[in-house]
Image (cartoon, rainbow, N blue to C red):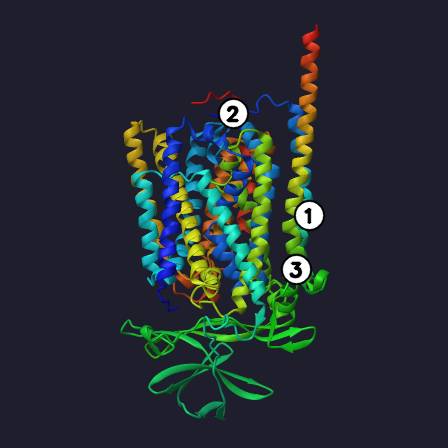
């Protein structure tokens, strides 16, 4: 039933991935909260023209959407890397075990 | 709004809906014959799964609601797009992988994986039921709106139609909302949005949007009155009947050829003028008059236009084709006419009046028209804005039906890849909603009675075929979402509550029967609510569902995953506190006050979205209750 049975996943790998997830989450949270706080406390800033004739509100808003996608790609890249490293370690161990 | 039936649109609509529903049944049967849903899911390519993810998520709220709210309130609608997408970050980075490690797919199962507690079963099933119902309301409202222009039916008939179709599907076959159908819907929705955005940019901005003669642009009348002692005394060609002041606006009733019309009396440095308004008058005898005439006369107009287009500091009549950045920056410099609603009594008649409100592009492209955080802001409105952004951010990961698809591909890598593709697709779509919403705001296509049809009505201006395909895809999306939610809530009643909590050992046959009865009851309930909430923007309504989900479910999930001392009593209490506090705040909010027929300004508080209070309350509850009633140190064997 459970195709993604990850109970065999090494705890160190799990911890690395989860630490990365939490770190990226807080990075995004700060950016997101920044938008909300500017809106509440420094509303005038949002009208400020930034790139391409767009105001800060539009640029920040579109930026948050694009940034979420970028963070997703970064997360995937590192998780895949960690998994590859863990796999390599595991196969090393198996090979060593095989020679004894 | 008065709609004419287009038979071309109708034919295409039925072909598409038939195709999608047919495919659902086809794949539904295939799914049943395979050993299990998840095993079948294991064969699915991550790319297909990613778009299907997007298809799952982009319900009526995204397509109808966000476009509609952008069309009416400008940037404030885009806030929903920003928040809906940000919610994925919580889901992907914090919840998805740990849930998978628990080996559980749904919120209820995951919460109970460690405890197997009856209190959790009960509270989680209540929470699933309530969140599903609140998610159902906007889908039903959206369905009613969609059917109106296509079939020329009243709103309630549309809601009834969707409800009936879904109940039949669920009760007779059980709706398997499968990956390929969601893939098709998600893919089509994104492609169609790209096409629509292309048309908007190619068309550019114009003061008289008539789509090269395919629709007629209506120019609103402006009359010059004679005034004495702050009263309009005469208007050439019209008879002055009455005058009424509502808030700081004064409206004047005039008649011509026996037809009564209301005008907005505006006074500025150029003198005073009477601007034409739109009215829907409910007469004491039950008849409704649109702009003073019966519906059949078709004297009610679609609205939304620009009163000034400024390019490089110069006023122009039209821009011609524009690029995406140019489109946004030109709008920012120009002026848009929005229509604002007031309600008042005129003798025994109830008048809903929509007057023109010229709005600078500057303020249209900033938050603040709906959620007042700049000019005219007060403490409540600022709290409301924060509350909404919090609910959207935290709600996605806590919706009972959202994360399931994460587990339908073979490897964790593929699951991640499809989630990221989904985020990219959904994000791209949300950027397009900005263009579709703004495009509807300035192209004279809006229905003042409901903002939800902005995008489909804009599509209609570009051609009946595009309109029917878009409506059909949106309608199929609603059908799929409603069916899924009804199955989820009937499951909460029949499986979680009756079977597990009440421990009625029912036979399989009896279980299915109870499930169907529950589905039927929830369906009827959803139909009634869909009728009751007509005219409210569906994204706004979804904001409530997100707030309840975020308050009831997320504190429990986060504490379970990240705090070892979390106890079963803490979880159950937090869910209950989250539900009750968010429901109480919603039921006493200004929007509900308006629904009860009371004056919204006299509501118990002015907070429209409850998350800011109910989420911290639920967090506090799970923390304190877990400290007071620590978990039993007994190894729980799972049933």
Q: Name the residue under label 1.
A: A30
Q: Name the residue under label 3.
A: A57
Name the N-terminal-most of marks 1 and 3.
1
Q: Mark 2 points at which residue?
A: B632
Mark 1 and mark 2, same subunit?
Answer: no
**Chain for mark 1?**
A
Query: In this rendering, is residue B298 above or below B565?
Result: below
Tell me whether the residue at label 3 lies in contact with that at label 2, contact meaning CB atoms closer than 8 angstroms.
Answer: no
Q: Whole-percent x and y of residue B277?
A: 45, 78
Which quadrant, please, contains the C terminus of chain B?
Answer: top left
Foreground disc of the pair 1, 2: 1
Instruction: Assign a secondary structure to mark 2.
Output: loop
What residue do we see at 57% from left, 47% from top? Answer: B425
Instruction: Assign a secondary structure to mark 1.
Output: helix
Q: Foreground residue, B630 or B220? A: B220
What residue do we see at 40% from left, 56% from top? Answer: B141
- Can residue B607 be seen from the camera position used here? no
Q: Foreground residue, B240 or B198? A: B198
What residue do we see at 36% from left, 34% from top? Answer: B29
Give the crowd class for mark 3: few <14, some 14-19, many >=20 residues within 10 Å.
many
Q: Distance between the residues labelled 3 and 2?
A: 50 Å
Query: In this rendering, is residue B285 above or below A10?
Result: below
Q: How far apart are marks 1 and 2 (CA)?
A: 37 Å
Q: In which quarter of the image is residue B32?
A: top left
């Amino acid at each position: 039933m459970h195709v993604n049975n990850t109970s065999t996943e090494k705890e160190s790998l799990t911890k690395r991935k989860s630490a990365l997830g939490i770190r990226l989450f807080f990075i995004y949270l700060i950016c997101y909260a920044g938008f909300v706080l500017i809106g509440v406390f420094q509303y005038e800033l949002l009208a400020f023209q930034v790139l391409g004739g767009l105001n800060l509100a539009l640029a920040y808003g579109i930026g948050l959407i694009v940034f979420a996608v970028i963070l997703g790609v970064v997360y995937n890249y590192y998780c895949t890397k960690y998994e590859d490293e863990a796999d390599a370690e595991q196969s090393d161990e198996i090979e060593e075990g095989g020679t004894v | 709004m008065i709609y004419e039936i287009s038979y071309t649109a109708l034919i295409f609509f039925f072909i598409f809906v038939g195709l999608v529903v047919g495919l659902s049944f086809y794949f539904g049967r295939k799914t049943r014959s395979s050993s299990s849903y998840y095993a079948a899911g294991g064969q699915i390519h991550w790319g297909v799964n990613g778009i299907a993810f997007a298809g799952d998520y982009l319900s009526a709220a995204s397509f109808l609601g966000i476009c509609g709210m952008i069309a009416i309130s400008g940037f404030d609608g885009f806030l929903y797009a920003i928040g809906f997408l940000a919610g994925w970050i919580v889901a992907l980075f914090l919840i998805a992988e740990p849930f998978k490690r628990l080996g559980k797919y749904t919120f209820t199962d995951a919460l109970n994986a460690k405890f197997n507690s009856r209190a959790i079963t009960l509270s989680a099933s209540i929470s699933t039921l309530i969140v599903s119902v609140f998610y159902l309301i906007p889908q039903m409202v959206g369905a009613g709106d969609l059917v109106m222009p296509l079939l020329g039916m009243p709103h309630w008939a549309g809601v009834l139609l969707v409800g009936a179709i879904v109940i039949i599907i669920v009760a007779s076959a059980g709706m398997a909302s499968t990956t390929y159908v969601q893939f098709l819907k998600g893919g089509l929705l994104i492609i169609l949005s790209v096409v629509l955005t292309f048309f908007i940019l190619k068309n550019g901005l114009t003061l008289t949007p008539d789509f090269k003669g395919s629709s007629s642009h209506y120019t609103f009348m402006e009359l010059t009155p004679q005034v004495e002692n702050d009263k309009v005394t005469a208007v050439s060609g019209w008879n002055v009947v009455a005058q009424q002041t509502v808030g700081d606006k004064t409206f004047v009733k005039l008649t011509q050829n026996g037809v009564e019309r209301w005008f907005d009396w505006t006074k500025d440095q150029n003198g005073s003028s009477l601007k034409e308004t739109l009215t829907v008058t409910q007469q004491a005898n039950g008849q409704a008059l649109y702009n003073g005439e019966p519906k059949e006369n078709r004297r009610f107009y679609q609205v939304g236009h620009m009163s000034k287009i400024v390019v490089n500091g110069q006023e122009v009549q039209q821009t011609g084709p524009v690029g995406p950045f140019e489109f946004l920056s030109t709008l920012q410099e120009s002026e848009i006419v929005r229509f604002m609603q007031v309600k008042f009594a005129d003798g025994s008649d109830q008048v809903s009046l929509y007057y023109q409100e010229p709005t600078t592009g500057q303020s249209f492209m900033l938050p603040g028209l709906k959620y007042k955080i700049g000019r005219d802001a007060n403490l409540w409105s600022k709290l409301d804005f924060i509350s909404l952004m919090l609910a959207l951010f935290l709600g996605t990961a806590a919706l009972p039906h959202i994360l399931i698809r994460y587990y339908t591909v073979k490897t964790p890598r593929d699951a991640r890849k499809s989630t990221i593709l989904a985020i990219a697709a959904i994000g791209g779509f949300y950027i397009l909603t900005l263009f579709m919403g703004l495009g509807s705001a300035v192209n004279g296509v809006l229905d003042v009675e409901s903002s939800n049809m902005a995008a489909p009505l804009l599509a209609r201006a570009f051609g009946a075929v595009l309109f029917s395909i878009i409506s059909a895809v949106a309608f199929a999306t609603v059908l799929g979402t409603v069916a899924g939610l009804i199955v989820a809530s009937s499951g909460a009643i029949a499986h979680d509550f009756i079977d597990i909590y009440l421990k009625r050992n029912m036979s399989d046959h009896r279980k299915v029967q109870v499930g169907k009865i529950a589905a039927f009851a929830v369906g009827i309930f959803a139909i009634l609510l869909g009728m009751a909430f007509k005219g409210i923007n569906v994204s706004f309504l979804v904001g409530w569902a997100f707030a309840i989900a975020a308050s009831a479910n997320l504190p429990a999930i986060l504490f379970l995953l990240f705090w070892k001392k979390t106890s079963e009593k803490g979880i159950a209490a937090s869910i209950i506190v989250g539900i009750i506090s968010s429901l109480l705040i919603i039921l006493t909010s200004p929007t509900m006050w308006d629904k009860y027929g009371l004056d919204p300004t006299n509501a118990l508080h002015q907070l429209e979205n409850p998350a800011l209070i109910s989420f911290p309350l639920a967090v506090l509850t799970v923390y304190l209750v877990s400290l007071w009633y620590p978990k039993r140190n007994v190894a729980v064997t799972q049933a």
